[in-house]
Image (cartoon, helix red, strand yellow):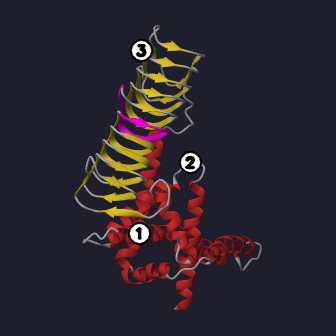
Amino acid sequence: MLKTRKNFFFLLLTILLVFPFSVQAGCLKTQKNITIAEKQVINDNIYALGKNLSIKGKVKGDVFFLGETLKIEGEVEGEIVGLASQIEIKGKTKNAKLLGKKVVISGEIKQNAYVFSSDLFLAKTASIFQDLLFVSNKAKLSGSIDRNLKSWTSTLKINGKIGGRADLYLNKNTNKPALFISDSARIKDGVFYRSNSKGEISEQAQIGGEVKHKFPQKEKKDPVSIIWSYLISVFSALLIGLVFITLIKNRTLEILYSFKRSSFFTPLKGLGLFLVFPVLSFLLLFTLIGIPLSLLILSGWLIAVLSSRVLVALYLGKTLIKKTNFKKESLMSALILGTALSWLVFHLPLVGWIFNLLAVCWGLGVLYEHLKTK
């Protein structure tokens, strides 16, 4: 699928910026309102940017949507990756990765569901055949989860079935009950939850295994802290980006063009720069006349590292906007889109540091090659 090596790192980062799924050829749709009719069959992936996306027919690939409203009434044989204000899954899909203000699931998810939302509702008709993992302000679960549930939420109501274990992390900023398990709830392998107060658990609820409650540890970050950390880091990156696109706009455009000409070995050069300069700075500290030079090198290295990630985000944002054929293309919109998506990837648990390092190395390598040609 890759025509040249120079596209490798761009493609790799772009895939992960959209919560990675199968990388295959697909159709790109950018209309305001996009509809897949009831009897229509799409034999490919769908990449959609617009206000509304409604799928009533069948999609044999994956669906990626960025917009305002996403509604699935038909069937998606692959997985759904949705970033929208309102998301409703009434049909069937293999996997679902959803980020939205309000998420409603009343259909079937054959494997796993991952949800980040303000309000999550799992209807009685909903079936998740494997696991549900979500972060939400409030949630009500009335459907069926065949395996495990893991959640971080302020308030949670469970009325449905959980075929495995429920691990729940609830609001630690209030002493009011945050967990409610009703008479109709059935949980096979027990409940473990952290909150400042005990939940309201009905005696008629069928819970196998133990019900364990622990008070939250103050030093651990809750979802709100994580979100604020993300927003602050994005804001800081945007400030750095504004310097590039306002004070040195022409030079920035030249650097962005250098990304296109970068090769497979560009990030390897960046990795060398990333490792060599701190070591050099450390060694200079042991010489009397080298201390000022050491501090100068370390300062320059730090600025380059911070700038490299922003430049990578700006390039990816610019490329994504260009590929969608939006009429209004600006460095500001590219900066906002690229930074928001890139920093989401950088904040992923366990693997975020890998892509952070990859972006730094790619950016440093491009900066080195650009300055070398001047």
Label 2, label 3: how far apart the Cα atoms are: 34 Å
The answer to whether 322 is drawn above or below residue 128 in the figure is below
Mark 3 vs mark 1: which is more N-terminal? 3
Nearer the observer, disc 3 or disc 1? 3
Q: Position of residue 301 (x, y in %)?
A: 59, 72
The answer to whether 169 is drawn above or below residue 112 in the figure is above
- State yes or no: discs 1 and 2 in contact (Cβ < 8 Å): no
Nearer the observer, disc 1 or disc 2? 2
Residue at image coords 56%, 69%? 305
Check the image and name the residue furthest to the front: 39
Determine which residue is flagged by label 2: 349
Label 3, label 1: how far apart the Cα atoms are: 53 Å
Q: Does the stretch in magenta take in 171?
A: no
- Whether residue 72 is visible, yes or no, is yes
Residue at image coords 58%, 65%? 358
Q: Is residue 47 left or right of residue 226?
A: left
Nearer the observer, disc 2 or disc 3? 3
Badge 3 crowding class, 10 Å Cα cut-off, few under 14, some 14 to 19, many 20 or more, is some
Determine which residue is flagged by label 1: 241
Q: Position of residue 117 (x, y in %)?
A: 38, 40
Badge 2 crowding class, 10 Å Cα cut-off, few under 14, some 14 to 19, many 20 or more, is few
Which secondary structure lies at badge 3?
A: loop
Q: Position of residue 65 (x, y in %)?
A: 35, 54
Determine which residue is flagged by label 3: 184
Badge 1 crowding class, 10 Å Cα cut-off, few under 14, some 14 to 19, many 20 or more, is many
Start-end of magenta stretch: 107-124
> Disc 2 marks which amino acid?
Pro
Q: Is residue 305 left or right of residue 95?
A: right
Q: Nearer the viewer, residue 10 or 272?
A: 10
Mark 1 vs mark 2: which is more N-terminal? 1
Which secondary structure lies at badge 2?
A: loop
Which secondary structure lies at badge 1?
A: helix
